[in-house]
Image: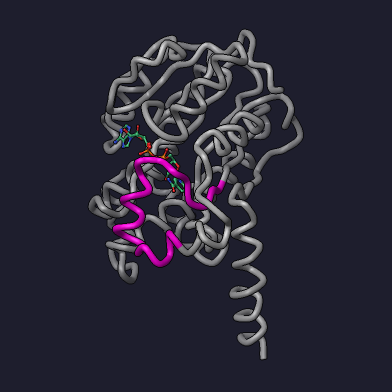
């Protein structure tokens, strides 16, 4: 069991789904939990609730200003689907974790730990690495978002892109901040039975969402994703950094063997 006694952990998206499940588990394991969400949570597991909006640079700054250190762990978990405009999706899912992490870094104690909730939807992160790494290198949000405006089908591709970039950002942190003792990892779930699932069904199609669950046997429970977040947040993963861990009931292995590997083999001929 991970032990969070004496640890201060910040969890974004704490008021619903995976974040709400993580908060409860963290509190049971002794953590002081700082919850961040645009919707207030009254869960007593949250020691301090920060209500704010992660969809703008200003909103992220305002949230960071309300969090006092020393912090031990930041779990960048808040996320939205492509039911929202593409610039908002990339802002909340990618630029907010990037900049909240940057803003909070000076408030960390020794050995900072960052954990990001990504997604299996980000599985093409290596394919789009160059373009998304260039996007992540642009500090100004409007300029960064403008750089992706001509991406094909950006209105629907934005969720996948946002999670690809979130995985890349997590890996970059592991490399760039290793010298200060920071560890950074991401978790990539398949489908999860949370309120957000209805938005994925609307944007990705019931055939894909239900099909994934049918193959895996069911949607994940939010608690199962929270368990992976807590492992990566804890000292039990002390030598894990720069990793993106699938937590999807085997879905990604099936997709690789049955679809990606044959496509790669065909392309190589
Ligand atoms: N549900 C799924 O099938 C699924 C699959 C893969 C990955 N994910 C990822 O898991 C993470 C958690 O999602 P969930 O399924 O628990 O969804 P959820 O909707 O239950 O929870 C998301 C939380 O984020 C908060 N949030 C959204 N926009 C915000 C903003 N602008 N400012 C502050 N808070 C904001 C919401 O209020 C909510 O409490 C997300 O990053 C999501 O992309 C979900």
Location of residue 266 (image quadrant):
bottom right
Identify which residue is drawn at 61% across, 60% down.
252
Location of residue 242 (image quadrant):
top right
Task: Give the residues in magenta.
Answer: 188-210
214 to 66, vertically: above or below: below
On the image, the x and y values in percent for residue 119 come to 50, 50
Which residue is nearer to you in this view: 138 or 9?
A: 9
Which residue is nearer to you in this view: 209 or 161?
A: 209
Identify which residue is drawn at 61% across, 32% down.
227
Name the outermost residue toward the right.
Answer: 239
18 to 110, vertically: above or below: below
Identify which residue is drawn at 55% across, 48% down.
188
Which residue is nearer to you in this view: 21 or 150?
A: 21
On the image, the x and y values in percent for residue 12 come to 42, 29
Dividing the image into four equal quarters, which quarter contains ligand 1?
top left
Horizontal side of 181 relative to 58 (left or right) equals right
Location of residue 43 (image quadrant):
top left
On the image, the x and y values in percent for residue 149 come to 28, 62
Name the outermost residue toward the bottom.
Answer: 269
């Amino acid at each position: 069991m991970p032990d969070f006694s004496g640890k201060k952990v910040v969890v974004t998206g704490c008021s619903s789904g995976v974040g709400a499940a993580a908060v409860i588990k963290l509190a049971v394991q002794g953590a002081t939990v700082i919850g961040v969400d645009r919707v207030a949570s009254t869960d007593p597991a949250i020691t301090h609730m920060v209500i704010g909006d992660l969809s703008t640079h200003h909103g992220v700054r305002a949230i960071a200003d309300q969090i006092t250190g020393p912090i031990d762990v930041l779990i960048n978990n808040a996320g939205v689907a492509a039911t929202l405009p593409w610039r908002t999706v990339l802002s909340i899912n990618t630029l907010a974790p990037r900049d909240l992490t940057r803003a909070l870094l000076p408030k960390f104690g020794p050995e900072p730990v960052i954990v990001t909730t990504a997604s299996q939807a980000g599985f093409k992160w290596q394919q789009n690495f160059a373009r998304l790494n260039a996007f992540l290198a642009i500090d100004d949000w409007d300029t960064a978002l403008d750089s992706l405006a001509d991406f094909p089908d950006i209105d629907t591709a934005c969720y996948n892109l946002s999670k690809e970039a979130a995985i890349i950002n997590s890996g970059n942190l592991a490399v760039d901040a290793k010298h200060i003792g920071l560890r950074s990892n991401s978790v990539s779930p398949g489908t999860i039975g949370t309120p957000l699932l209805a938005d994925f069904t609307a944007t990705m199609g019931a055939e894909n969402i239900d099909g994934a669950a049918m193959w895996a046997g069911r949607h994940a429970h939010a608690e199962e994703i929270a368990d992976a977040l807590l492992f990566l947040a804890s000292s039990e993963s002390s030598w894990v950094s720069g990793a993106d861990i699938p937590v999807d009931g085997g879905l990604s292995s099936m997709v690789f063997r049955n679809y990606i590997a044959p496509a790669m083999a065909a392309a190589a001929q």
